[in-house]
Image (cartoon, rainbow, N blue to C red):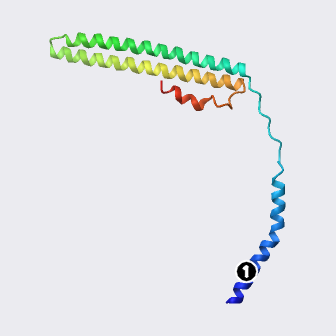
Amino acid sequence: MNSFIQKFAISVALIALSSAPVLAQDNQNNNEPSHSPKPRPVVDTACMVKAVDTRDTAIISAFGSYSTSVQSALMARKDGLKAAWALSDTKARREALRKVWNDYRTSFRLARRTLRDARNVAWSQYKTDAKTCNGNGERDSSDNQGQDSQL
């Protein structure tokens, strides 16, 4: 059994020693690039400044419209609830309250949807503009779009 282990150990050692020069040659060849790196396009920074301005101006405007819509919905809700609670007939009051809350919910959802759509359009246009400016590889891109979804 001892001679078997010795023969096996010698065989492994011979295989390892005979393959070492081949592995060394492969490592030497891997240090040389097989192709030249592609040059990065030059970013037109003035173009990017304009793209950012266009995007953020659109988002600011959309948020202003959203704020106005929500204020109108809240005012209508307040006036509607006051009028509903002033009704003496229980059945009419319940119907009026239900209508006020449904109208408010519909108005609020429409305001949110309009803001979301305007934000998405602004970001979509920005991505198109950034490609034109060769700035789509920079950090100020769609990976930050989620920040605006919290508005």
Residue at 78%, 74% in the rendered image:
15
Q: Look at the picture and state if 34 lies above or below 148.
A: below
Q: Look at the picture and state if 65 lies above or below 132.
A: above
Q: Which residue is mark 1?
A: 9
Provide residue 79's location: percent of width, then percent of height: 29, 10
Counting labels gives 1
**Apparent side of residue 151 relative to residue 44 in the rendered image (left or right):** left
Residue at 51%, 16% in the rendered image:
62
Provide residue 123's location: percent of width, then percent of height: 59, 24
Residue at 62%, 16% in the rendered image:
54
Q: Look at the picture and state if 73 lies above or below 7.
A: above
Mark 1 belongs to which amino acid? Answer: Ala
Residue at 40%, 15% in the rendered image:
70
Q: Secondary structure at mark 1?
A: helix
- How dense is the environment of label 1, judged by Cα within 10 Å: few (below 14), some, or many (20 and up)? few
Provide residue 122's location: percent of width, then percent of height: 58, 20
| Quadrant of image for the N terminus | bottom right
Write down the quadrant of residue 144 in the picture.
top right
